[in-house]
Image (cartoon, grey):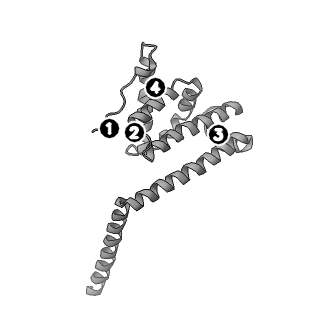
Amino acid sequence: MATQSTGVRRIVSAAKTKLAAAIDSVSTPGSRHRKRAALAEQHRLSFDLLCKAMDDPALAEVLNTYESEIPLHKQRQFLFANALYVNNLHFYRIGALSQAELYGHLRVMCQNKVFREYWEATRHHRKSLPEASEEFILGRMMDDLIQELDDSDTDEWWVVGEPPDESA
């Protein structure tokens, strides 16, 4: 038994050491740089795939996960709307946009009928996101913004909604 306890303690100790090293590496400037570089590479690859799908109807069909029949030209518009949305999210994630600035960009995008159709057609896609995830929170922010725009009785859309308070 003593041997097993010693072995377990070594494994637990090694796991704690690795976890501490991982936590330290996440907080170091070099790892933040690597994370930004990885996000940039992920964004570039995703964008390349979206561009291929927009150019090739056979590839666009692979991304057709809508709950209703969507004509090819509309699918291509939706792919482009997705690319615009994801581009704004990318800039937010790398720190090039604050959340309030992202909100402003999204408010402008919501003025477009095709973007609104895309957002509604992909509502079911967001249902599987964990509620604590950044993407879920930003999606909810977008849903709230669209609702506020719909409920608004002003033509001055640029004043509708309250950008998030980033000091909290």
Instruction: Give the label, 2 or 4, closer to the camera.
Output: 2
- Left or right: residue 100 versus residue 63 is left
| The quadrant where residue 117 appears | top right
Q: Are marks 2 and 1 in contact (CB under 8 Å)?
A: yes
The image shows residue 92, relative to residue 40, as above or below, that is above
Q: What kind of element bears circle 3?
A: loop
The image shows residue 63, relative to residue 40, as above or below, that is above
Whether residue 57 is visible, yes or no, is yes
Residue pointed to by mark 1: 166
Q: Residues within 10 Å of mark 2 (few under 14, many from 20)?
A: some
Residue pointed to by mark 3: 64
In the picture, the disc for residue 146 is 4
Residue pointed to by mark 2: 98
In the picture, the disc for residue 105 is none
Instruction: Give the label, 4 or 1, closer to the camera.
Output: 1
Cα distance between the residues tagged 2 and 3: 32 Å
Q: Quadrant of the C terminus?
A: top left
Q: Residues within 10 Å of mark 3 (few under 14, many from 20)?
A: some
Q: What kind of element bears circle 1?
A: loop
Type of amino acid under label 4:
Ile
Type of amino acid under label 2:
Ser
